[in-house]
Amino acid sequence: MIKRFLSLEWKSFIRSASFQANLAIKILMIFGALYFMVMFLALGAGSYYIIEKATESEPFQLINRFILYYFVCDLVFRFFLQKTPVMNIRPLLYINIKKDTIVNYTLGKSALSFFNIMHLFFFIPLAVVLLIEGFDVLGVITWLVGMIAMVLIINFLNILIDKKDAVFYAVVVIFAVLGALHYYDLFDATNYTVLFFKGLYDYVWMVIVPIATLILVYKIVHSFFKSNLYLDAGLSTTHDIAKTQNFEWLDQFGTLGTFLKNDIRLITRNKRAKSVIIMSVLFLFYGLLFGSGAIEVYDGPVWQVFGGIFVTGGFMFSFGQFVPSWDSSYYNLMMSQNIQYREYLSSKWWLMVIVTLIAAVCASFYLYFGWQSYLLILVTAVYNIGINAYIVLLAGAFTKTPIDLMSNKNAFGDKKAFNFKTLLLVIPQILVPLGLYYLGILFFDEVIGLGFIALAGILGFAFKSKVFNWIENIYKTQKYETIAAYKQKN
Amino acid sequence: MIQVKNLTKTYNGTTVLNITNLDIPKGQSFGLVGNNGAGKTTFFSLLLDLIQPSTGMITSNSIQISQSEKWKPFTSAFIDESFLIGYLTPEEYFYFIGELRGWNKADVDSFLVKYEDFFNGEILKNKKYLRDLSKGNSKKVGIVAALIGEPEVIILDEPFANLDPTTQIRLKKIIKELADDTNVTILVSSHDLQHTVEVSNRIVALQKGEVVLDLVPSSETLKELEAFFAA
């Protein structure tokens, strides 16, 4: 039986849409995976020494203290990105296979996912370093076993809380509060958790605790899964209660309003699209890393421009980049209904401009760091509106990945989204303003540097109708290819 | 209304559609029948400029479909679920289509009243998004949406499939009414010979991409078609 399952898995892997893609994308994917592995490897091997060098405290003690946050971040990451392989079960249900076998197979498969393997690249080198540093061999082994058990526990917990947003956000809020209390020295939860994590090393017998927990969690998930293995239970798709929203105040904008209405509904009613909002808000705070000394290299003046672009551009980059793809599931309608390409594109453009302006207003808290910081954000916002809004639309013309609106898990899974044309477009998006600013401060001063960026943005804005003609034509030439690409759902 | 000349569509050397000459006059109710892979959907996709012809051309109201977008204001279609916006409620979807075709909310509302029977109380005010509707119900939405805005050319691909018997009968009535309107050219494809015979005043059968029959329905037509497809 296992052999059959494995052969199914192998086929689904080899024949998946992303693997059928061309060689260049495959190479990029492999590079992406290697990048993560190397990062974790470096982190695992290096963190001990980095901590030893940078702080007074005992590195292993500190690692055990902060490992709590590591696992919380892991859970957050998984919640958004890791897929629970539920849907693949459907065709197995009425075949002569025991339900236990199906569940074990599904859960076992999830244990082997990249999200778990990744952590081995962190913990194993770290364990090796510990051994080199002369820590007790048996203790390190039980500690490592404990950590792997924790990773698996989180893996199964994530399956349990899948689709249960309330549970997830509750967990996130609890830990955010704990983190804040810790930061302000009010209450340090890690004082208690460190006892446990360090205990795995100090007291070998304690390894029973995570292993027993793992077994327990597995049993719970197993019975939960098994009892929900019906088309109208765990395998059903939940139906939201729909409410008709007419946004009549947008009617005054004519056709533009018609499209804006739909885009608002698109963003608010689809999981995948909602993540765009989260990204935009997160990027709003991205600038805090710059000039605050949080990360050393980010304090350079040119890097601050880099940060500035993302502060107001978060929405633009996360939404705009996939512009026609958001409409992929009903693209045939958009192409055959009474819609001119130009209206369609300009509604997307306006949406990005409006959100960028809102972000620019929201970012006014950067005034706290001085008017220069905020001026920089405003100037980069002008550049975002004047230049980057076009470029993301342009990139969209070549991004032919259909988006499954229902799923929020493939934000990084859109392999086809990485193609060379879109990659090339990063240069004018980010490097050009950095270059302009650099020229400005090289020959004049910072204000002139900012002036250069703003000027580029204003010029771009002035040529809007010319640029739109050009983009529209590109979209038209890509039309049939795009329709064909959107037909191939994963 | 619609002229087809030397139209072919070829994928990797296989010709899936080859129509030398086809004229669909204004006001006709045109029924297209054929087996799977006969080229019905390919033909409709070409009519909507969703795919490019390999050779030849289609003109609608003297506008060459693949060259200009001017056919869009008077043409509407429902081919498959890729014409539905899953995250909208049926009402929002109808208003959206209405707005695209120059109808305001009140126009759409008074239009929808006529289709209350057809909807059978399962569509409007049901607190469901289109993505959560059953196949039959989402088909009803798609068909009615294709009638919004007084289009002169209406293209419906397999409108009877997935509908329950009562709805099929009601749909036949709707299509017949449209067929009586001399301003509306309606193109319907189907696997179901009887339905097509009932609603059309011209029937064309496709086989392997070519027109093999072109009939005006009479009392003998159904038998003739059945004999043809049985062979």
Image (cartoon, rainbow, N blue to C red):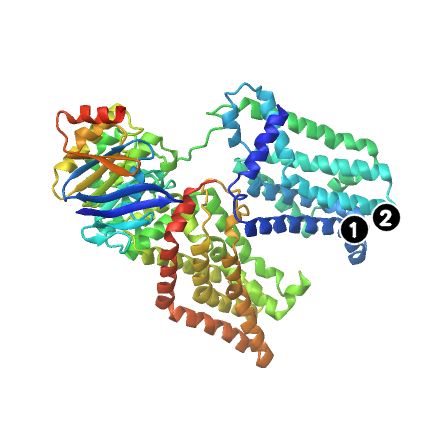
Question: Which numbered disc flags the more N-terminal residue, 2 or 1?
Answer: 1
- Residue A149, x across and y down, in percent: 71, 34
**Label 2 chain ID:** A
Instruction: Identify whether A369 is placed above or below B59.
Output: below
- Identify residue for label 2: A133
Q: Are marks 2 and 1 on the same chain?
A: yes
Question: Which of the two residues, A219 or B12, is positioned nearer the viewer here?
Answer: B12
Taking the image as shown, residue A154 lies to the left or right of residue A414, namely right
**Label 1 chain ID:** A
Mark pair 2, 1: CA separation: 10 Å
- Residue A407, x across and y down, in percent: 49, 40
Taking the image as shown, residue A58 lies to the left or right of residue A463, namely right
Residue A473, quarter of the rendered image: bottom left
Please name the residue shown 23% across and 31% down the image. Answer: B118
Question: Which of the two residues, A143 or B80, is positioned nearer the viewer here?
Answer: B80
Amino acid identity at mark 2: Glu
